[in-house]
Image (cartoon, rainbow, N blue to C red):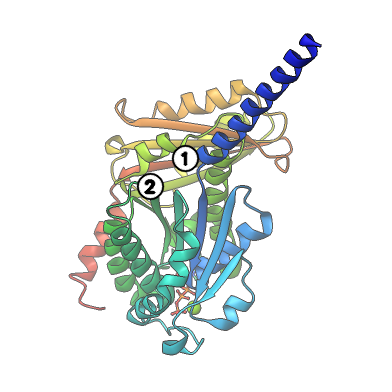
Amino acid sequence: MQAEQAYAETGMLEETQEEKIEKFAKMAAPTVVAIGLGGAGCNVITWAKERGITGGKTVAVNTDANHLRITKADKRILIGEKLTRGLGCGGYPEVGEKALNETANDVIKEISNANIIFMVAGLGGGTGTGSIVALAEALRSKFASSSFPRLLVGVVTLPFDVETARMAVAKKGLDRLKSACDTVVVIDNNRLVKIAGNLPFREALGVANTTIGKFVKGITETITTASLINLDYADLRAIMSGAGIASIGIGEGMGEGRVEQSVEKALNDRLLDIEDVTKARGLLIHVAGGEDLTLYEVNHAAEIMKRSLPPKAKIIWGARVDKELKGGVSVMAVVTGVESAFLRKREKRLGPVKLW
Ligand SMILES: Nc1nc2c(ncn2[C@@H]2O[C@H](COP(=O)(O)OP(=O)(O)OP(=O)(O)O)[C@@H](O)[C@H]2O)c(=O)[nH]1
Ligand SMILES: [Mg+2]
């Protein structure tokens, strides 16, 4: 009888420990939201929603009701309905900014519980440029005195060279965004076209959206779900908070030498030209592979990457198994705290921006 009672008590004790572990694990798990603004931003969110981001919530925001209707997201929000009547901003970022401000509370309510907020937009248009800047600035000032850990990450594309009129708008938007976010991951659509080869325009955009989607999905899942090697929120903060501009590269490989191939591509096919990699503040390496991915390969990828960075740069890495990558490996390299020669050159050519 005594033994039975003791057993029952032990059982109860074990149960409470289990419950405790569950409770604390839930509390400790960082929450992630990816929010797309404007046409390009919503297209990326649709990509992510269709493939699913385990552990992350997707939100889509636009002034364009028609585009929002075909966008897929956990939550869709039409912004600035009084101002634009659901018709878009026609390329005017000041309208995009006002539209966000009109509906700011609805948007902030959907994302303010997250530890990591990815804000995605194509710079150069009206809605994306104006609303991403307004949202980042609103979040920055709203949470200035909050002790809740938050990381604001902008993920934006730069206009194609042919979109000359949009370049100045994008530049101004990026400057403001940089001041409001912890890190802005910049993807130059021109670099992308070069890397993607002679793809038709629509398909090249598709490549861009896939790349950005993979970045957001990869980081979110490695942070929120059990992975081969977990990325830890504190580590991510260390390389991303107050880190300015970041450049990203993604490489994929198959068969023999797949790790070397992928790393080489991820380092060479950067989606933003960066000035001096030796000044980089940090490197995030993310390795995904099919079920045959080995720890040796993951280690090897990290070793090769380390050699190309200054010894003082902080390096963090994560790895996941992705069942869809049968026999393949995908490596993502995010270099933070960099300067872009490309951006500076454009600045010279444009002179001081007076628009907006
Ligand atoms: N990578 C990528 N870039 C895109 C896509 N669509 C547009 N862009 C780029 O993003 C810029 C902004 O375009 P949109 O996102 O359509 O513009 P918007 O923010 O909706 O602005 P308005 O339509 O003026 O209200 C364009 O100038 C292109 O350079 C896309 O699907 N993928
Ligand atoms: Mg639009």
Residue 354, position as x, y percentages in the image: 20, 77
Q: Is residue 25 visible?
A: yes
Where's the N terminus, which quadrant?
Answer: top right
For residue 87, above or below residue 310: below
Q: Within 8 Å: ligand 1 and the Cβ of disc 2?
A: no
User: In this rendering, would 350 be left or right of 125?
Assistant: left
Compare residues 59 and 287 and report the one nearer the observer.
Answer: 59
| Tag 1 near tag 2, CB within 8 Å | no
Q: Which mark is residue 262?
A: none
Q: Position of residue 177 (x, y in %)?
A: 32, 61
Label 1 environment density (alpha carbons within 10 Å; few <14, some 14–19, many ≥20): many
| Left or right of residue 347: residue 142 | right
Quadrant assignment for the C terminus: bottom left
- Disc 1 secondary structure class: strand
Does the rendering let one see residue 162? no
Q: Which mark is residue 333?
A: 1
What numbered label is drawn on residue 148?
Answer: 2
Q: Nearer the viewer, mark 1 or mark 2?
A: 2
Q: Residue 100 at x, y = what percent?
A: 40, 75
Please name the amino acid that badge 2 sits on. Phe
x, y (%) of residue 156?
Answer: 42, 60
* Cα gap from disc 1 to disc 2, whole angstroms: 28 Å
Among numbered discs 1 and 2, the one appearing first in the sequence: 2
> In the figure, residue 13 lies in which quadrant?
top right
Q: Name which quarter of the figure residue 350 lies in.
A: bottom left
